[in-house]
């Protein structure tokens, strides 16, 4: 185990529900999904911020996000799939890919008129790997 949970997933010292993997990239289901099917795409090598990712690897991560987006649109019948880099929780570059049902699925508190009454967190979204197994079969790419 390392101090980075995503390096642990990349080197298989921690488990994850993986939907795609090659020599440089892993895509797995987020255990705190914004929406069903929420995936994270990471480079296997520890790279802290997305702007440090070599452009060819970043392009491959984007292409994988596009494949997942097409699959998500077909399965979940959504018009939009979000693809974004944030990196606020784990300092290992990761792209979030998830079906968008509402504009509020991704937003900023700046757009909320009364933000002092909001509570932010993700613990209420937590699911275990058993809860993700059916989704894996929907999104696994060949
Ligand atoms: Zn890492």
Image (tube, rainbow, N blue to C red):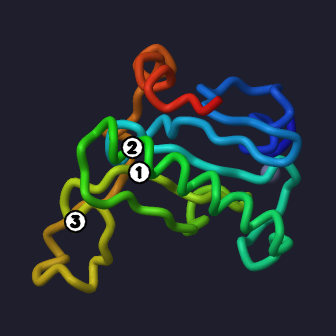
SS at badge 2: helix
Q: Is residue 113 left or right of residue 42?
A: left
Give the x, y percent position of residue 53: 81, 70
Q: Which residue is mark 3?
A: 104
Q: Residue at x 14, y 69 (%)?
A: 117
Question: Of discs 1 and 3, which sits in the foreground?
Answer: 1
Q: Is residue 119 left or right of residue 141?
A: left
Q: Which residue is mark 2?
A: 72
Q: Determine whether label 2 and label 1 are within 8 Å by CB.
A: yes
Quarter of the image for residue 3 reads top right
Give the x, y percent position of residue 15: 69, 24
Give the x, y percent position of residue 109: 28, 77
Ligand 1 within 8 Å of disc 1? The answer is no
Quarter of the image for residue 55 reads bottom right
Query: Separation of disc 1 and disc 3 at Cα?
Result: 13 Å
Q: Quadrant of the N terminus?
A: top right
Q: Which residue is mark 1?
A: 98
Question: Of discs 2 and 3, which sits in the foreground?
Answer: 2
């Amino acid at each position: 185990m390392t101090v980075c949970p995503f390096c642990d997933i990349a080197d298989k010292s921690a488990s994850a529900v993986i939907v795609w993997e090659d020599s440089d990239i892993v895509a797995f289901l987020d255990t705190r999904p914004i929406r069903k099917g929420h995936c994270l795409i990471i480079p296997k090598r520890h790279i802290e911020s997305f702007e440090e990712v070599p452009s060819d690897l970043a392009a491959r991560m984007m292409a994988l996000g596009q494949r997942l987006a097409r699959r998500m649109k077909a399965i979940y019948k959504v018009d939009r799939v979000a693809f974004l880099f944030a990196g606020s929780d784990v300092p290992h570059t990761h792209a979030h890919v998830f079906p968008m049902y509402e504009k509020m699925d991704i937003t900023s508190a700046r757009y909320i008129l009364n933000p002092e009454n909001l509570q932010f967190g993700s613990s209420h979204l937590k699911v275990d790997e058993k809860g993700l197994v059916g989704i894996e079969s929907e999104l696994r790419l060949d």
